[in-house]
Amino acid sequence: MKRLHMHVVVESLPEAIRFYSGLFAQSPCCGGASYANWRMDEPPLNLAASLANRPTGLAHFGLEVEAPAELPTIDRVLQDPAYPSGSVPWEVSVRKRRISKEFES
């Protein structure tokens, strides 16, 4: 597992950006008119805050993995009745690592 993902629905995006940027001591890595996203390595977290036409609070949890090969193991746990995920929806995503290459002139 690479990161835990948490998505929260907020009433005010500017207030959420101010709060979470202060909490994590970093600005969002990306965003738009209705969302902001923070990705950090310590703690390993991908936090999304968005405006949505639904109640504020936790929208869902998720897990980011490094490679598709990790998905079957996680899926077995999430689908196992012995580990009910409750009423909070889960999602699992594979994040592609960007590789930059430096070329000699």
Image (tube, rainbow, N blue to C red):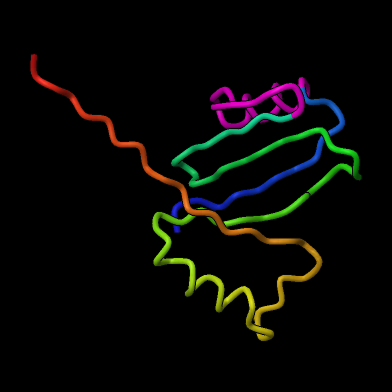
Q: Residue furthest top?
A: 105
22 within the magenta span: yes
22 above or below 43? above
Q: Is residue 2 magenta?
A: no
Residue positioned 54% across, 54% down in the render: 93
* Relative to 44, residue 100 above or below: above
- Quarter assignment of residue 81: bottom right
* Residue 97, position as x, y percentages in the image: 37, 42
Q: Residue at x 71, y 30 (%)?
A: 35
For residue 83, side relative to residue 53 (left or right): left
Q: Is residue 3 left or right of residue 52?
A: left
Residue 80, how many percent across, how many down? 63, 82
**Is residue 70 shown above or below 54?**
below
The magenta stretch is 14-34
- Could you tell me which quadrant the C terminus lies in? top left
How many dots with numbers? 0
Q: Position of residue 2 (x, y in %)?
A: 44, 53
Q: Residue at x 43, y 61 (%)?
A: 68
Q: Toward the viewer: 15 or 29?
A: 29
State the image quarter where residue 30 is shown: top right
Q: Residue at x 52, y 70 (%)?
A: 74
Q: Quadrant of the N terminus?
A: bottom left
Q: Give whichever of 60, 95 is nearer the camera.
A: 95
- Which x, y percent locates residue 78? 62, 73
The extreme left residue here reads 105
Residue 18 vertical position relative to residue 41 in the rendered view, above or below: above
Q: Is residue 2 left or right of residue 14?
A: left
Judged from this view, the residue extending furthest toward the bottom is: 82
